[in-house]
Amino acid sequence: MTHIPYGHWPSPITAELLTTQGVRISEPQAVGDCIYWLEARPQEKGRSALVCESAGTRKDLLPAPHSIRTRAQEYGGAPYLATAQAIFYVLDSDQRIYHHDFTNAETRSITPDGAYRYADFCYDHARARLIVVREDCTQDTHNPVSAIVALELNSNKISVLAQGADFYSNPRVSPDGKQLGFLRWNHPNMPWDGTECVLAQLNEPGDIIGSAVIAGDEQESIFQPQWSPEGELFFVSDRSNWWNIYRWDGVKAHAVCPMDAEVATPQWVFGMSCYGFLSIDEILCCFSQQGFWQLGVINIPNKKLTIIERDFRDISSIHCRNGAGYFIAASAGQSAQLWRYTNAELRALTKSASTIDKDYIAAPHAIAFATSDGESAHGFFYAPTNLQVKKTSEKLPPLLVMCHGGPTGATESSLNLKIQFWTSRGFAVLDVNYRGSTGYGRQYRDRLKNNWGITDVIDVCSGVDYLIAQGLVDRDKIAIRGSSAGGYTVLAALTFSDVFKAGASLYGIGDLEALARDTHKFEAHYLDSLVGEYPTQQKIYHQRSPLHHIHQLNCPVIFLQGLQDKVVPPTQAEAMVAALKKKGIMTKYVTFEEEGHGFRQAQNIQRALNEELAFYLTVFGEN
């Protein structure tokens, strides 16, 4: 063991390792003896591969460079559906839906060429058709028209089933084919603010002949409507402050198992799933309490929850079929794996990508701390960890504060190699679930309404104050990093406080007005609730935009930006960089020509991390 300065500790967790072990699995589906899932592969230019495993044999359904991904609502999700006879998928290259028939091994496109995007598939067995959410960009690429449409497989005819709302999701046909449940919502709401669950009646040809809103409004968020094996519609609602599961009996909704926990997560992408039916009497679900995810089985008749005791910290993508449940889960020491739950037993179907020695893994410690405005916030603290290095008693480590995106999102406590990259080098990390984050009930989530750029900034600063008071970090070496909405919190904290000595904004926001004018349809009115209605409240937008208060930003900043980003265009970073350079502040601007909102390609992920590390070491005088 040797004395080595913080930030320079030798670590096996390199930027290269993050990409070689950075395959992200998602969206499992099971049909018969086959199990399908998606793999996002940085080493293959970030392509999303559809994997199938059957009888112990695993294969990709499509060879490289084909990527299965939808651009619907920019963030995508739910780009494929497997049935016993066929598989349907969206190709990233042209955004068309393809139908691969297992019987004759033929593949054909079933949607026309053009400016359309599709997601969230449901197969209507009674009528041999595919029901999907479609975005029509033919008239206005910036403001596409959303609808639920049916694709007739025999004729390729497309008919519109539901339209008129700004957004749709989760179209699901009842087992008897007589009803269709779906979600819809309108600007300025986001799906976690207010959605409506619609139950529609279908005639024999499959047209909607009547419909009613059975749950939800502008103040109630509905999530994941799903039919039970007996043909009852279930859904998740936050009407009690907590996202809980409800059953619709034809007249009213009944809470299935009330608890102070969240059986949902913000619907940023299509296809999110936190529960499924193991049988007519049992639901397999995942839920979040105080930032930790757990797995459980709900007995529907008894309204009883049985927790499945495992060390999982992050759980998602629950899919149930024929008495078995499939889901993605990660623990504090292992990255995400695909699991199967059947007959009260758990079995991992994929291996953890992580092979890191536990001597280099920092454990997350959940903390709650008082905020300077008299409330409290949450986060996870990671102490620098590397048992091959002897820590010096006279010095405290530098701190890196992390701000999750969204801002309506949350950080998790499962193994995150991007956090371990820093802690194994000698940085302490505070990953903040500031007020506005999910997992702590709707009231906590709503605390950021009209307060973005204020409450979140107070919370990250208060978290730093708490750690300094505990004698855990060096007050003179505090940095903050965040991506997207987290990047805005970074720039706001650097501008409107003097707590931080450096910052990193990854495709972050410096000008709220520009974001309100330029962003895509899904988030076009997101800021109405976070900041204020625009342009009516233009003054507030100006007050909270770091770009307009650059005279208050006095520390070094590094900006990392994809040049194809349509969510937060590069002009945001470029305006901040130009202003800071004019002022003479140490600034670095790192761009990635082929990346959009988030970095997918291995070499770009590696470069971004290495550039950021070098920047901090230079700022803190460690180079």
Image (cartoon, grey):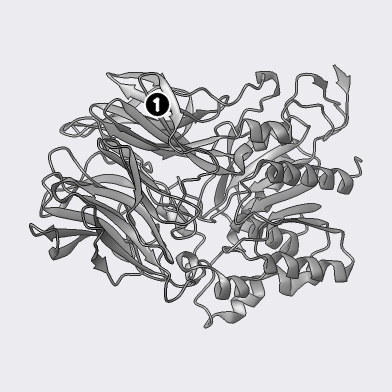
Tell me the quarter of the picture where residue 322 sits. Answer: top left
User: Please, which residue is most extreme toward the left here?
Assistant: 204
Q: Residue furthest bottom?
A: 536
Q: Position of residue 113 (x, y in %)?
A: 41, 63
Who's the residue at 51% across and 67% down the image?
520
Q: Nearer the viewer, residue 414 or 471?
A: 414
Q: Can residue 131 be seen by looking at this rendering?
A: yes
Write the residue at 57% across / 51% down: 434
Q: Position of residue 564 (x, y in %)?
A: 63, 61
Task: Classify 10 Å Cα crowding around label 1: few (below 14), some (14-19), many (20 and above).
Answer: some
Q: Is residue 46 left or right of residue 174?
A: right
Amino acid on which disc 1 is placed: Glu
Q: Is residue 493 left or right of residue 107?
A: right
Task: Kindly tell me whether residue 216 is visible in this rendering.
Answer: no
Please tell me whether residue 541 is drawn above or below residue 235 in the rendered image: below
Q: What residue is shown at x 35% (from left), y 19% (from top)? A: 55
Q: Quadrant of the C terminus?
A: top right
Q: Position of residue 38 (x, y in %)?
A: 45, 38
Across and down, in percent, residue 598 comes to 61, 52
Residue on which the image places disc 1: 53
Asked if residue 241 is positioned above or below residue 200 in the image, the reply reads above
- Name the quadrant of the N terminus: top right
Q: Between 58 and 293, which is closer to the camera in this rendering?
A: 58
Which of 507 and 479 lies nearest the eye of the viewer? Answer: 507
Instruction: Determine whether, in the image, residue 398 is placed left or right of residue 279.
Output: right
Q: Is residue 240 left or right of residue 592?
A: left
How many numbered discs sit on the rendered protein? 1
